[in-house]
């Protein structure tokens, strides 16, 4: 997994490539969570994400909860059909803002 985090004022863009699974999720969470403290808009770009596991979903749920606490928004864009299928099968499609 490769994650690029770009901050612009109160917006954080997170571009994730490869696999977001039990091995790679802790690395993303370690980079992401401290960066959310003064963010109002969080955008994940999953155009290069090939796979997401339950561990990856947990990171997204934690980020969603944190953004709710901050009164901000979180959006996931460019998710592949296979990643969207995981969101649908797990019910996360109803929790996450997937564009």
Image (cartoon, rainbow, N blue to C red):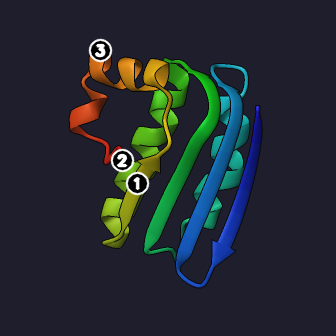
Give above or below for 62 relative to 67.
above
Secondary element under disc 2, as helix, strand or loop, is: loop
Kindly identify which numbered label has been placed on residue 89. 3
Q: Nearer the viewer, residue 11 or 71?
A: 11
Q: Image quadrant for the N terminus?
A: top right
The residue at which mark 2 appears reads as 99
The residue at which mark 1 appears reads as 75
- Gap in angstroms between the C-alphas marked 1 and 2: 7 Å
Task: Please name the residue shown 71% across and 35% down the image.
Answer: 17
Is disc 3 surrounded by few (<14), some (14 to 19) or many (20+) residues within 10 Å?
few
- Gap in angstroms between the C-alphas marked 1 and 3: 19 Å
Q: Where residue 14 sits in the image (x, y, percent)?
A: 63, 54
Is disc 2 surrounded by few (<14), some (14 to 19) or many (20+) residues within 10 Å?
few
Between circles 1 and 2, the one closer to the viewer is 2
Give above or below for 21 relative to 98.
above
Badge 1 vs badge 2, beta-carbon distance below 8 Å: yes
Secondary element under disc 3, as helix, strand or loop, is: helix
Considering every residue shown, the one lying at the far right of the view is 2
Q: Earlier in the sequence, mark 3 or mark 2?
A: 3
Give above or below for 61 relative to 52.
below
Give above or below for 82 relative to 46.
above
Q: Earlier in the sequence, mark 1 or mark 3?
A: 1
Badge 3 vs badge 2, beta-carbon distance below 8 Å: no
Task: Please name the residue shown 53% across and 18% down the image.
Answer: 53
- Gap in angstroms between the C-alphas marked 3 and 2: 17 Å
Q: Nearer the viewer, residue 70 or 98?
A: 98
Question: Horizontal placement of 59 versus 15: left or right?
Answer: left
Q: Earlier in the sequence, mark 1 or mark 2?
A: 1
């Amino acid at each position: 997994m490769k994650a690029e985090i770009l901050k612009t004022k109160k917006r954080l863009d997170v571009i994730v490539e490869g696999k977001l699974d039990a091995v790679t999720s802790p690395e993303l969470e370690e980079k992401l969570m401290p960066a959310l403290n003064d963010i109002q808009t969080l955008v994940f770009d999953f155009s290069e994400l090939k796979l997401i596991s339950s561990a990856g979903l947990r990171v997204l749920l934690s980020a969603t909860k944190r953004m709710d606490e901050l009164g901000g928004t979180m959006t996931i864009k460019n998710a592949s059909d296979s990643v969207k299928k995981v969101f649908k099968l797990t019910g996360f499609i109803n929790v996450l803002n997937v564009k």
